[in-house]
Amino acid sequence: METCLSDVKLIEPEVHLDQRGFFFESYNQRAAGSAGIKTEFVQDNFSHSVQGVLRGLHFQVKQPQAKLVQVLYGKVWDVVVDLRRQSPTYGQWEGFELDDQNHRQLFIPPGFAHGFSVLSPTAGFLYKVDRFWAPGDEAGLAYNDPQLQIDWKVARPILNEKDQKLPLLRDLTQFPLLQPA
């Protein structure tokens, strides 16, 4: 399903329910390709967080990652911000509720900052990425940037020290990926 931000896709898998529970394909390369996702994923990451945690907004600079994300248990408010300077939606954000009931997945192409806040008592979050994590290439964007005015749906977010010190969008010009063509 298309979203307001070009190339970001919300995926609603076909879920098969019966008295035992449910089953769905969490990833199918052919189905992804049919949806326009031609990404080859190389690494899976998993995080467990408690209610009120806000992780983000993160991205890699020289080795930007495409991500396919989903919630295995719990509920999150997932946010992406377009950092592609040539994009008509540069600097815009969109949020999506992902949880273990709707089974939605979100495909985030390279060039976007990504983060989420936890709305349930706990949440398990799975990321598939197309490039390996590069510790020296990490960067981020302030979750509370007044230019973006993101509603994180949590009153007092719990952040790590690094995420509390991230720059504003207007200060990201030092990154080559984010420079005008």
Image: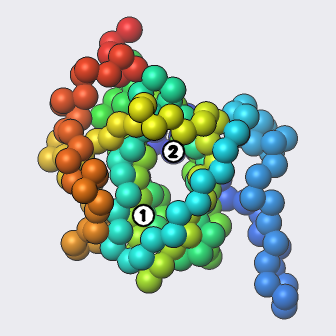
Q: Residue at x 21, y 39 (%)?
A: 167
Q: Residue 107, how many percent across, how many down? A: 59, 45
Q: Which residue is mark 1?
A: 77
Q: Residue at x 44, y 83 (%)?
A: 121
In the rendered image, the vertical position of residue 15 relative to residue 176, given as above or below: below
Q: Residue furthest front?
A: 136
Q: Mark 1, mark 2: which one is toward the viewer?
A: 1
Regarding mark 1 in the picture, which secondary structure is present there? strand
Residue 36 horizontal side relative to residue 137, left or right: right
Relative height, residue 176 to residue 43 (above, below): above
CB atoms at circles 1 and 2 under 8 Å apart?
no
Q: Estimate how packed mark 1 is, as few (under 14), some (14 to 19) or many (20 or more) residues with alpha carbons within 10 Å.
A: many
Q: Earlier in the sequence, mark 1 or mark 2?
A: 2
Q: Amino acid at mark 2?
A: Thr
Residue 39: x and y in percent read 69, 33
Q: Residues within 10 Å of mark 2 (few under 14, many from 20)?
A: few
Horizontal side, residue 75 vs residue 176: left or right:
right
Q: Tell me what residue is drawn at x 59 percent, y 75 percent.
A: 73
User: CA separation, marks 1 and 2?
Assistant: 15 Å
Identify which amino acid the numbered label 1 is placed on. Answer: Trp
* Residue topped by disc 2: 3
Classify residue 52 as left or right of residue 111: left
| Residue 22: percent from left, percent from top | 79, 78
Q: Is residue 151 visible?
A: yes
Q: Please state which of residues 62 and 28 is positioned toward the viewer in this rendering.
A: 62
> Would residue 66 appear left or right of 26 to someone viewing this image?
left
Structure colour scheme: rainbow
Asked which quadrant contains residue 126, the reply is bottom right
